[in-house]
Image (tube, rainbow, N blue to C red):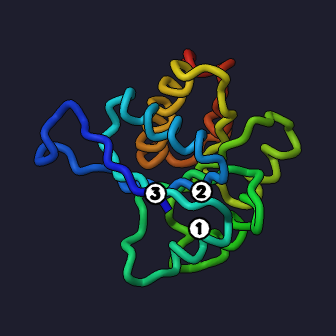
Amino acid sequence: MISAENPDAESPKEKEPIKILLAEDDTEDQELFIDALDEAQIASEVTTVENGQELLDTLRDESQSDPDIIFIDVNMPVKGGKKALEEIKKDDDLRGIPTVMLSTWDHPADIEDTFAKGADLYVQKPNSFNVFVLLLKKVFLLHWAKALLGPVRNLFFVSEKNVGKG
């Protein structure tokens, strides 16, 4: 498990860091995610786990505080992202935590399946670091917009193709 803090341009007293739990089995993708958050100037504390079972164990560990948001890679060993998502959304204590699915795929059936299982957002992993930074900025903009506006179906899937749109 890796923990990292990404300071924001503002002082920590002005902005409370967002507690992020990232379930991602690829260490290079973990580092890319943390670097992109830093580049996006999103004040955050990131904890990483390498599979869906570690994710659930971490969430159920009463000595750990709940994250503000969870990012889950769809394809992981031991327990995949969709199965972990399903268990999170069936748990009364965890279901309210916003969940963002991450995948290289943009297959409509996968997207629909994660939506049906209760994911708040589905993000297609981009090929470019700069686009990843833009995607994360949009995710956090959408996260707070969704909290104010309620779920909007056309805001569910985020990819390189729609990162520049509204």
Sequence-first disc among 1 and 2: 2
Q: Are marks 1 and 2 in contact (CB under 8 Å)?
A: yes
Q: Nearer the viewer, residue 20 or 47?
A: 47
Q: Which mark is residue 40?
A: none
In the depicted structure, whether residue 157 falls above or below residue 159: below
Q: Nearer the viewer, residue 35 or 102?
A: 35
| Amino acid bearing label 1 | Leu
Secondary-structure class at tag 1: helix
| Amino acid bearing label 3 | Ile
Mark 3 vs mark 1, CA separation in Å: 13 Å
Location of residue 3 (image quadrant):
bottom left
Mark 1 vs mark 2, CA separation in Å: 6 Å
Secondary-structure class at tag 3: strand
Q: Nearer the viewer, residue 115 or 49?
A: 49
Q: Mark 3 sits on what residue?
A: 2
Q: Could you classify mark 3 by the number of other residues whose Cα lies within 10 Å: few (under 14), some (14-19), or many (20 or more)?
A: few
Q: Position of residue 108 (x, y in %)?
A: 85, 38
Sequence-first disc among 3 and 1: 3
Q: Position of residue 90 (x, y in %)?
A: 67, 75
Q: Is residue 49 left or right of residue 113?
A: left
Q: Mark 1 sits on what residue?
A: 55
Q: Position of residue 45 (x, y in %)?
A: 35, 52
In the depicted structure, whether residue 19 falls above or below residue 143: below
Q: Mark 2 sits on what residue?
A: 23
